[in-house]
Image (cartoon, rainbow, N blue to C red):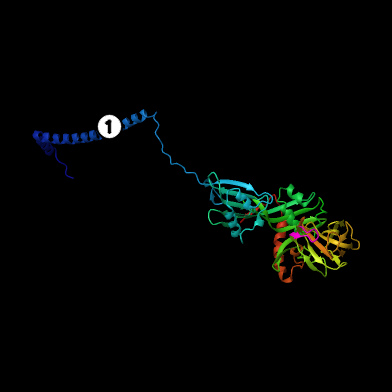
Amino acid sequence: MKIPSNGSMAKSLKKLLLSPGRLLILFAERMKIIIHKQKKKIVILAITIFFLCILITLFIIFLSQDNKTIPIHKKKEIPEQEFKYGLPVDSFVVLTGVIRRNETLGEVLSLYNVPASKIAQIHASAKGIFSPRMVQAGNSYTLFCNKDEKQTAQYLVYEHSIREYFLFDLTGQVNISKHKRPERRQRKYFSTAIETSLWDAMLRNNTNPMLAIELSDIYAWTIDFFMLSPDDHIYTIYDETFVSDQSTGISRILAARFDHADGIFYAFPFMQDSTVSYFDENGNSLRKQFLKAPLRFSRISSRFSGSRLHPVLRIRRPHYGVDYTAPVGTPVHSIGDGVVISMGYSKGNGHMVKIRHNATYTSAYLHLSRYGKNIRKGAKVKQSQILGYVGSTGLSTGPHLDFRIWKHGHPVDPLKIKSPPTLPIKPENQAAFDSVKTYWMQRLKRFNPVVEEPELYD
């Protein structure tokens, strides 16, 4: 690079010193730049001060308003309308009651200004849907009435059972509809020692006592439930049905083990010949079949009825038995194994024998002419053993046998008892039964109601 000499630099400086006008021009331009920058800063500062004053003013106004309430507008919440049986409760006067003895729904409705013509329509519309026989004392009902002085019933709901109810629409042409509540099933595991009876064992463990009824039906021909001991033990896996939180019964018993009298009795359900029966671990049926009838040769002269005209008294009364007409002296046979729990003579029944077959079934044989050999109270009898002979003792119009059966203490129609098959598992069903038996037996062997949680499913 060429460096200027001292002589050339001196000449340039001399030119500047010798040109005062040029210096003034340079100075003026420099001042313009400085002034322009200062103005810009002043403008920015002024704008900042302006907005700051506005904010201070707003803050002062806010502080001055601190004692004043600023209204807050809230959205008004509309309460949800309550429905019962699908009807809006707020639109009616809702009344509840319980059916009294011998009371009908027509009598209930007449108390709430429902005209007789409307009640007659109910009877016409009920065919195939609702029967007056369904009305039972103790069942509840609900009335939906107009909100006026008369409070005329517009709807009636009759609670037939926990599972279902009937809705009577009286607003126009009478309409009757049947409604079923949703049910759920719950898998349950139960185990307990039996100190006194199976029923008491259920109550002691806060378990549905209907389980005792189901188990006694299954083991009715195998275990004498009147001879249980404190050493007996029951294990069972079953399904119980519920509507909401209320039990509606035992749906099915899936497996059971009964330790009784130094023996172990298993029970496994299996369908054979379109019928579900219970079998032991060897595939043998747990039930013994009743005889179809206690007489060999006879005809039916009167059937089981809730209201029959008595042939002697000439009044209508229940007849909880089946009358078999036969000649005097015709042998009368026990329909199954059992124990004579009572026998003797009464004015109405004549000579009578009563047999307890198991914890479920009891049978009676009335109007006998005389008793069979060795028949006495407490005696054990076998199926087909002669209990006595046909006669016409007591209130009777002629020789016949009045035959009766009770199931759990309630009279049942002997002609409608379905005797399950007593055949063992058939060879063609053995593999399928063994699979079912193995599965449930393993569940029973590792049974622990404290550890295993109940399984819920729909």
Residue at horizontal 16 percent and vertical 44 percent from the top: 2
Majority secondary structure of magenta residues = loop
Query: Which portion, as a residue range, is magenta?
Result: 306-315
Q: Residue furthest right?
A: 374
Can the viewer see residue 307 in this picture? yes
Q: Quadrant of the C terminus?
A: bottom right
191 shown above or below 58: below
**273 or 355: nearer the eye?**
355
**148 or 197: nearer the eye?**
148
**77 or 39: nearer the eye?**
77
**Amino acid marked by disc 1:** Ile
Residue 353 magenta-highlighted: no
Can the viewer see residue 177 in this picture? no
Q: Quadrant of the N terminus?
A: top left
Residue 308 magenta-highlighted: yes
Q: How many marks?
A: 1
In the picture provided, is 36 more to the left or to the right than 254? left
